[in-house]
Amino acid sequence: MMGVVDKIKELDGAKITIQRENRIFVDVDKDRVIGTLYSLKLMGFHQLSVQNVVDRIKDGKFEIFYVLYSHEYKINVIVRTWVDRDNPVIETADKIYPSAHTWEREISEMFGIKVEGNEDCGKPFILENWKDIPPMRKDFDSVKYSSEHFVFRHSEGENE
Amino acid sequence: MERMTEEQVKTIANMLRKRSLWMIHYCTGCGAMELPPTMTSRYDMERFGLAPYVTSRQADILLITGYLNVKTLRRVITVYEQMLDPKYVIGFGSCALNGGVYWDSYAVIKQLDRYIPADLYIAGCMPRPEAIISAFRHLMELIDSGKADGYKRYKRNLAYYKENQRKVLG
């Protein structure tokens, strides 16, 4: 009988890192993400806990990760992929994990990532009347934006 | 019997008003955490005639509990304008006062009183229930002496408040 970890190790085109007994990283190319997610769901990873993005500004990439969990094996599998910062386009995973629909709306608003196949991406989700670059990108200057749009209170006796 | 003057009517109205304040239950930030002990038996704010209430039309006090971001501000202004006169606003915690720990956030407004008139601020992060009770007592004194006139200032300086609101909300 083959264990689930051995099955994960046999995934095509994936680099497996076993960080702990119950935490496995699966690094794949952008094109293989949907296939990998589908294979993992068939193995028993039914829950998408988080889908989110890390801005790797030094490498010029966005790291997109999917945290999957299996209640059967008690294992977290983290599927990671990288897209270019200049033209960030990913494919939707909402056909496999329906909850990805909402996560993708959030990442497309907060990071400006285009999600193909998700028709709700691009619609306003959390931010209202946002005209600047997406706020969760590392090159977004929060202090500058804040001081331009909102007025600071200066207490008495402060040098200003 | 001699008719009462307008001044006397106001004095009596204020005296009665301060003893029955209803507070709208609109919790904007983390400061709402301090309200359950204030409302319930531990600190029991009902002994001062204060009670939480669910609708804006019947409420007297709008308590801004904690940070206020752009998205919430739009709703707060709607709630504030729905409330009937006289109405009082208390800014609660350092976030409503000057942004607090969210001073550099892209979403959090810094000064509450630029957008709606605040009668009173409670400083601290978080203010304890004692501080809230103390603020309510202070608000009662202000009402009694006729100094809690935020709703009048809002009407008088409507252009100023609306301009500030438009700048942020678009």
Image (cartoon, rainbow, N blue to C red):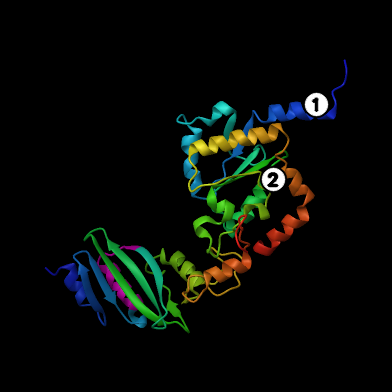
Callout 1 crowding tier (Cα within 10 Å): few <14, some 14–19, many ≥20: few
Provide residue A142's location: percent of width, then percent of height.
Answer: 53, 69
Q: What residue did someone put label 2 on?
A: B82
Q: Amino acid at mark 1?
A: Gln
Q: Are marks 1 and 2 on the same chain?
A: yes
Q: Residue at x 26, y 58 (%)?
A: A71
Q: Residue at x 39, y 67 (%)?
A: A51
Q: What residue did someone put label 1 on?
A: B8
Q: Please, what secondary structure does the residue beneath circle 1 have?
A: helix
Examine the rendered structure and indicate whether residue A93 appears above or below residue B168: below
Callout 2 crowding tier (Cα within 10 Å): few <14, some 14–19, many ≥20: some
Q: Find the residue positioned furthest to the right.
A: B2
Residue A158, disc:
none
Mark found first going from the N terminus, 1 or 2: 1
Q: Quadrant of the N terminus of chain B?
A: top right
Provide residue B85's location: percent of width, then percent of height.
Answer: 73, 39
Asked whether A112 falls inside the magenta stretch, the response is no
Q: Residue at x 35, y 78 (%)?
A: A81
* Closer to viewer: mark 1 or mark 2: 1
A62 displayed left or right of B80: left
Examine the rendered structure and indicate whether residue A32 appears above or below residue B145: below
Provide residue A91's location: percent of width, then percent of height.
Answer: 42, 77
Q: Quadrant of the C terminus of chain B?
A: bottom right
In magenta, the rendered stretch is A33-48
Asked whether A40 falls inside the magenta stretch, the response is yes
Q: Amino acid at mark 2?
A: Gln
